[in-house]
Image (tube, rainbow, N blue to C red):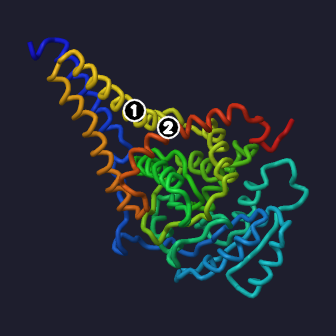
Amino acid sequence: MLLDDITVFVCVLLLLLMVWSLLSDTFFAKVDVCGGDGDAGKPCGPVSVIIVSDNNAAELAANLPVYLSQDYQSGYEVIVVVDRDEDGTSDVLKTFADNPLLYTTFVPDSSRYMNRRKLAITLGVKAAKNECILLADATARPASSHWIERMSSACREGVGMVLGYSDFAEGTGCFKRFYRFHRTYSLFHEAQSGQAYSLLGCNLMFRKSMFMAGNGFLGNLKYLRGEFEFMVNKYSDVAGVSIETSRDSYIVENVPSLKKWHDMNVFHVETRRHLANGFRHRAAFVSDMLSLHVCMLVSVVMAVWSAIVSRWVILPVAVLVFIVPLLSRTLTAKRAIKSFGVHVPLWRVVPMEIHLVWHNIKYVFLHKFSDKYDFISHKS
């Protein structure tokens, strides 16, 4: 009998696994992407750009001119807050001293037993003259001279935060750029669904009044990293969140060194332990990765088993269940990649998706064996 109970059960199971894999695909959910200038709203008014520098003399010399040459009619200021200066940062800033857009300040040396980076941001916010603030980093630069214009156009009435995309510079490994894109795409979809969770990179606009009313980083001051992640996670419940995805709104980060890449991932594992709504966010990723692996593994096993026991009806179903999710994931990734303008070869999408889960497991283990005091400023 070709269609006995076992054959029907296996075929139905395989088809259900296929549907699970298709629906769990991160790129299956569509993120509304801004197109041309017609999508831009009215700019929110004058903007204060805050850049934190931590021994970043070379990066400031290369990137600060881009911040100071923005085409923004409503006016803006650039505030550079220097955390540490052991590499001639002050000398670099002196070369821009005649620029009326630039204001510089320094974190006091006496501030040794608190998170200096979050203190630097807080000092910058307090020094800001404007309500709308753009937070960036010395190791990154705007992708265009319309960065402020595009980000501010998304800060409409009722919006307290605007999440922007941070890409890595050309020369960064393909997997690193895909990892950043894959995770940001998921975070942007959550934000558009009214459930903003976090932000990767260093491209965030927010309102000064919101930050001050919420006592800044109060509640996560002791953690050394995660400024952007904590801010989005903390304030998304009290303010509307928008995303801006036009290419002109991008920030381009320098190619990460091996050490920086390692630190980013290990500190991310620590940071996410302290973010609200983490279970909901991670459940979506786990479902995506688990469905991909289970669907592929089970379809291969069933194809081999059906050939061995001569259950030939199962074989084409197993092959179909193996191929369809791969094609679907490639096509949905193609749509997402094209809309964001990220340079990722399509033939590498599925292999890199498979690699994502093992990449995460690796850093979970590295974090587990790290000294917990490496992640906090209070060493008591």
Q: Which residue lies furthest to the front in this view?
A: 308
Mark 1: secondary structure? helix
Mark 2: secondary structure? helix
**Is 303 left, or right, of 348 in this rendering?**
left
Q: Which amino acid does label 2 sit on?
A: Val
Q: Of 301 and 92, which appears nearest the observer?
A: 301
From this view, report whether residue 238 is shown above or below residue 71. above
- Quarter of the image for residue 276 reads top right
**Is 376 left, or right, of 302 in this rendering?**
right
The residue labelled by disc 1 is 293
From this view, report whether residue 227 is shown above or below residue 63. above
Q: Which amino acid does label 1 sit on?
A: His
Residue 4 x %, y %: 13, 12
| Quadrant position of the N terminus in the picture | top left
The residue labelled by disc 2 is 357
Q: Do the residues labelled 1 and 2 touch (CB within 8 Å)?
A: yes
- Quarter of the image for residue 328 reads top left
The residue that appears at 57% across and 75% down in the rendered structure is: 46
Q: Which residue lies furthest to the left in this view?
A: 1
The residue that appears at 66% across and 57% down in the rendered structure is: 257
| Quadrant position of the C terminus in the picture | top right
Residue 308 x %, y %: 24, 18
Q: Can residue 216 be seen here?
A: no
C-alpha gap between disc 1 and disc 2:
10 Å
From this view, report whether residue 179 is shown above or below residue 153. above
Residue 108 x %, y %: 87, 61
